[in-house]
Amino acid sequence: MFDTILFPIDRSRETQEAAETVTNLVNTYNSRLILLSVVEMEQAEDEEQQDSRQMTSKEQVTELLEQVKSLFTQQNINPETMEREGRPAFMICDVADEVNADLIAMGCRGVGLIEEEASDSVSNRVINLSPCPVLVIP
């Protein structure tokens, strides 16, 4: 049913809490698991500042992916990892399409539950743009 599960991650508590549900899904369906972290770059006024931010961000993303990957490895799951740069919701959906994901499983900070902020919610945008089903884990 869910041959490929895409799990977008960040440093949030919600991502950590969603990992248990993702572990259960992967084990239940014997799925391929892809961890994705997206670096959202701010516009820098000069190129030197931008390069400095990019290097730091990529190092943080690599470290985060390795930490989360090791958590899954302890559960006998060997996830693939992907790093991307751009707007998170759009990159998540692009990667889901690229890897033919059957499910995007993601944590939710609850921002989209407030009507005024719903359009700013990454999970809400992913739900509206996704090429596959989305499981939002509160």
Image: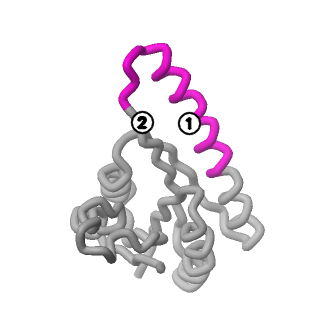
Mark 2 is surrounded, within 10 Å at the Cα level, by few (under 14), some (14 to 19) or many (20 or more) other residues, namely few
Q: Report the disc number at residue 41.
A: 2
For the N terminus, give its image quadrant: bottom left
State the residue at coordinates (41%, 74%).
110
Amino acid type at image mark 2: Met
> Taking 119 as reference, is 78 left or right?
right
Residue 117 sits in which quadrant? bottom left
Which of 75/121 is in front? Answer: 121
Amino acid type, mark 1: Ser
| Residue drawn where x is 37% and y is 41% of the image | 86
Q: Does residue 131 appear anywhere in the picture?
A: no
122 w.r.t. 134: above or below: above
Above or below residue 72? Residue 24 is below
- The image quarter in which residue 27 lies: bottom right
21, 80: nearer the viewer = 21
Q: Secondary structure at mark 1?
A: helix
**Residue at 73%, 71% in the rendered image:** 76
Q: Residues within 10 Å of mark 1 (few under 14, many from 20)?
A: some
Q: CA distance from mark 1 to mark 2?
A: 8 Å
Q: Which residues fall within the magenta stretch?
A: 43-65
**Position of residue 78 measured from the top left corner of the image (x, y, whole percent):** 66, 62
| Residue 72 position in % (x across, y down) | 68, 67
